[in-house]
Image (cartoon, grey):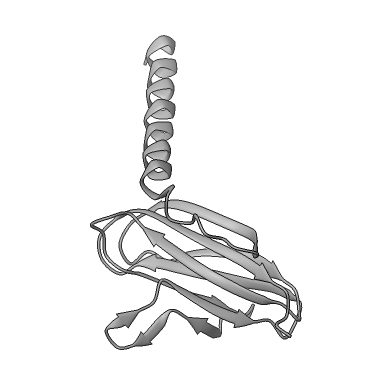
Amino acid sequence: MDFRKLIFSFYIFFLLSHFVSAQCDLQIQDCFRNVGKSKTIYFFVHNTLPNQPINQRIYLQEGYFYTFSACVSKGLGEMIFGIENTQGELIKNNIVKENELKNSFEWYCKKTGFYYLIYWLHEGAGCVAIQVSMHPPKL
């Protein structure tokens, strides 16, 4: 392959990946407007495929409430997400009952350390976002 064709191919790949990322950002930019008094500590945006879990390692502090919120591009399937400990045991997720999912849940951290945020689209493919917010203890 000619060197110029190779450079051109990389350039096209870069532009397309940037375009997809920008489109993803545009589709979900209005999702998290009301953060309130909470402090957003993590925000993940991904283009994802159905039933392919994404694991994000996060560090959480004891004594704080954390709100995990999700947003999915319009017209896509539901997102399932939760928090696991480092041994892979599920701590909490957004499943209310068999056919009902919430777009957020709150959890109180009892032990400082690393955890795994897991999420995936149950059906469909497209842009997803997860926001993790930290709240001081409620008095």
**85, above or below 34, in the image:** below
Query: Residue at point 27% right, 55% down?
Result: 74
Q: Is residue 126 found left or right of 105 in the rendered image?
A: left
Work out whether residue 108 or residue 80 is closer to the camera in this orientation and state it: 108
Query: Residue at point 62% right, 74% down?
Result: 66
**96, above or below 22, in the image:** below
* Residue 62 picture quarter: bottom right
**54, above or below 9, in the image:** below
The tally of labels here is 0
Q: Is residue 6 found left or right of 113 in the rendered image?
A: left
Q: Where is residue 45 in the image (x, y as percent from the top left)?
A: 48, 52
Q: Where is residue 36 in the image (x, y as percent from the top left)?
A: 59, 63
Work out whether residue 127 or residue 35 is closer to the camera in this orientation and state it: 35
Query: Residue at point 43% right, 24% down?
Result: 10
Work out whether residue 138 or residue 115 is closer to the camera in this orientation and state it: 138
Work out whether residue 119 or residue 133 is closer to the camera in this orientation and state it: 133
Q: Is residue 113 found left or right of 132 in the rendered image?
A: right
* Residue 124 picture quarter: bottom left
Quadrant (top left, top right, bottom left, bottom right) of the N terminus: top left
* Residue 67 picture quarter: bottom right
Q: Position of residue 115 (x, y in %)?
A: 64, 73
Q: Position of residue 25 (x, y in %)?
A: 43, 43
Query: Residue at point 39% right, 76% down?
Result: 102
Quadrant (top left, top right, bottom left, bottom right) of the C terminus: bottom right
